[in-house]
């Protein structure tokens, strides 16, 4: 199987490179996902599966009117270009989506067949991307949430700030489950390897549903920094611009459990990530 991965520079793309180094990896400037001509010009010979790990994920800037066309092009039009080629080649398309496609008013983990009701521009474009992925008859739409991995992410930011500050304020009334990019990458590859039934899946860390403040506290537990919980309303008082965020983001994992893919407890995964980060920092310090 020759997998073509688009979006190799992000957290998920890097995790996939470590797991399947024999795959073909592309990112800008090798391909412009928003251009039909650029995607069509790729060498599709021998490609047996497509994984779309590319996305516009800057949630707050996505709300800016002048940026919205680009956000749409990346998160929706670009998915169509990949789905068209997946349909033409009759190969599976794996597309990664997000908890932001939901309103966030659930009180228990959100099932895969819950009604899409995005509240912001980012969520709306990702919901449109899901629909575009359906144009490939053999598709996996995999929703995830709160991803951390090799690259800029919430955990790394919290730890960097914690090194210089005695306390950090973090929102405590938005809840969900964190996801290690390595575990997400493994889940995507397992769906392909096992030729699981095509359709929509949820793949996040398992374990307890927590707030961003609790997640932050776990991320900096080995430091002297204290996490001070605040409400979303308090956060918005300080933010110059903030996209609407779902207050409840925990995704039901029944769908992916049913095909034999077990997602790790996010706390266990976080420990592995922190160990890897420490090793990376040590290596960079001795280079």
Image (cartoon, rainbow, N blue to C red):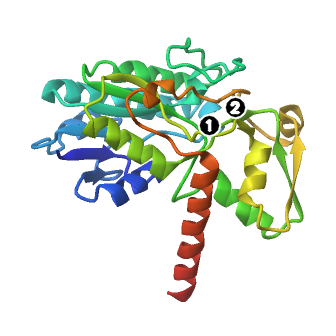
Please give the label number shown on residue 243. 2
Q: Quadrant of residue 190?
A: top left
Residue 15 drawn at (x, y percent)? 42, 55
Residue pictured at 52% horizontal, 81% vertical: 283
Residue bearing mark 1: 59
Q: Say how many tags the image has.
A: 2
Front-most of residues 228 and 33: 228
Quarter of the image holding residue 83?
top left
Task: Give the x, y percent position of residue 214.
Answer: 78, 46
What residue appears at the point 39 percent right and 47 percent down from the top-left corner?
186
Is label 2 in a helix, a strand or a loop?
loop
Residue 50, relative to residue 26: is it above or below? above
- Residue 163 in picture, x, y percent from top left: 78, 70
Q: Nearer the viewer, residue 162 or 202?
A: 202
Question: Dots 2 and 1: beta carbons under 8 Å?
Answer: yes
Query: How many other residues sit within 10 Å of disc 2, few (<14), some (14-19) or many (≥20)?
Result: some
Q: Residue at x 77, y 61 (%)?
A: 221
Give residue 260's position: percent from left, percent from top: 39, 34
Mark earlier in primary sequence (2, 1): 1
Query: Which residue, as the protein is rendered here, is positioned at the far left?
Result: 45
Q: Which residue is drawn at the image coordinates 33% and 53% (left, top)?
A: 29
């Amino acid at each position: 199987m020759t997998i073509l991965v688009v979006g190799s520079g992000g957290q998920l793309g890097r995790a996939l490179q470590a797991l399947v180094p024999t795959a073909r990896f592309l990112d800008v400037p090798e391909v412009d996902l928003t251009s039909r001509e650029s995607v069509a010009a790729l060498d599709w010979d021998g490609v047996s599966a497509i994984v779309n790990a590319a996305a516009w994920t800057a949630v707050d800037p996505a709300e800016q009117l002048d940026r919205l066309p680009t956000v749409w092009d990346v998160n929706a039009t670009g998915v169509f270009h990949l789905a068209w080629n997946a349909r033409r080649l009759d190969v599976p398309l794996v597309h990664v989506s997000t908890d932001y496609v939901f309103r966030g008013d659930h009180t228990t983990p959100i099932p895969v067949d819950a009604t899409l009701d995005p509240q912001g521009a980012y969520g709306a474009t990702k919901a449109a991307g899901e629909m575009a992925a359906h144009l490939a008859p053999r598709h996996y739409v995999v929703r995830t949430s709160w991803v951390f991995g090799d690259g800029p992410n919430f955990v790394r930011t919290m730890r960097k700030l914690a090194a210089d500050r005695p306390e950090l304020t973090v929102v405590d009334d938005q809840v969900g489950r964190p996801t290690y990019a390595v575990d997400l990458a493994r889940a995507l590859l397992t769906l392909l390897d096992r030729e699981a039934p095509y359709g929509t899946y949820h793949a996040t860390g398992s374990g307890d549903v927590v707030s961003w403040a609790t997640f932050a506290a776990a991320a900096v537990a080995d430091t002297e920094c204290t996490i001070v919980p605040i409400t979303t309303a308090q956060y918005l008082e300080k933010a110059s611009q903030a996209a609407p965020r779902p207050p409840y983001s925990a995704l039901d994992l029944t769908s992916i459990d049913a095909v034999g893919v077990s997602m790790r407890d996010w706390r266990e995964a976080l420990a592995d990530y922190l160990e890897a980060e420490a090793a990376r920092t040590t290596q960079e310090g001795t280079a």
